[in-house]
Amino acid sequence: MIINGIIFMVIAYCIYPPIEEFINSKNSISITLNINIMTILYIAITFLFMTIHEFIHACFIPDFLKSDKTYWGINVLFGFVCTTEKIKKSRYIIISIMPFILLSIIFPLILSTFGLLNEFILFLCLLNAMGSCVDCLNIWIILRQAPNGSYIINNGVETYYK
């Protein structure tokens, strides 16, 4: 989580000048929380962003729309997508990393190019980067344990390779 957060903050520091000013300022930090319609809207947008993260995972699962073995769900506050389809190791890695790349690297770069990047979007991208730590852990485990060319099969909380 920390590594993903650092990677994202380095990118944010480079593409969004107010971050640099904030880090270099000598002012103190003050946080005020007001519950109003905008707060509820921000919370809804945050959950929408998490849903987009899971949808990106699903888009890279082969034939996810036709598959009877691909499942969506919500676990307390977090969504998930899983499949019991047999997936090549390389495809599994792509499925796992794409939300991080698309939502925490490419998305803020595009918005910055058009001058549309703001603090809330940076916050969403940071949450996505830190939330992607589980995906990165899965990638690290698969890279270390599954042989090249193998297939990955999820069965609930257990993952096998063949």
Image: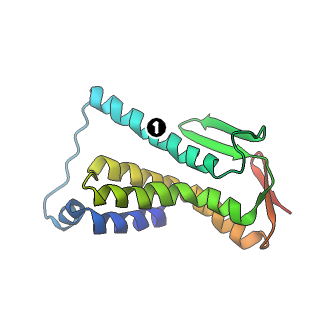
Q: Amino acid at mark 1?
A: Phe
Q: Is residue 81 above or below residue 99?
A: above
Q: Name the residue: 56% across, 58% down.
A: 98
Q: Name the residue: 72% across, 46% down.
A: 63
Residue 63 can be seen, yes or no:
yes
Quadrant of the rendered image containing residue 10: bottom left
Viewer-side residue, 28 vs 128: 128
Q: Is residue 3 above or below residue 126?
A: below
Question: Please, what secondary structure does the residue beneath circle 1 have?
Answer: helix
Residue 62, position as x, y percentages in the image: 71, 51
Way the structure is coloured = rainbow
Q: Is residue 41 above or below residue 137?
A: above
Quadrant of the rendered image containing residue 97: bottom right
Residue 49, position as x, y percentages in the image: 45, 43
The residue tagged 1 is 47
Residue 70, position as x, y percentages in the image: 73, 41
Q: Is residue 147 left or right of residue 37?
A: right
Q: Is residue 86 left or right of residue 72?
A: right
Viewer-side residue, 151 vs 37: 151
Q: Which quarter shows the C terminus? A: bottom right
Viewer-side residue, 28 vs 104: 104
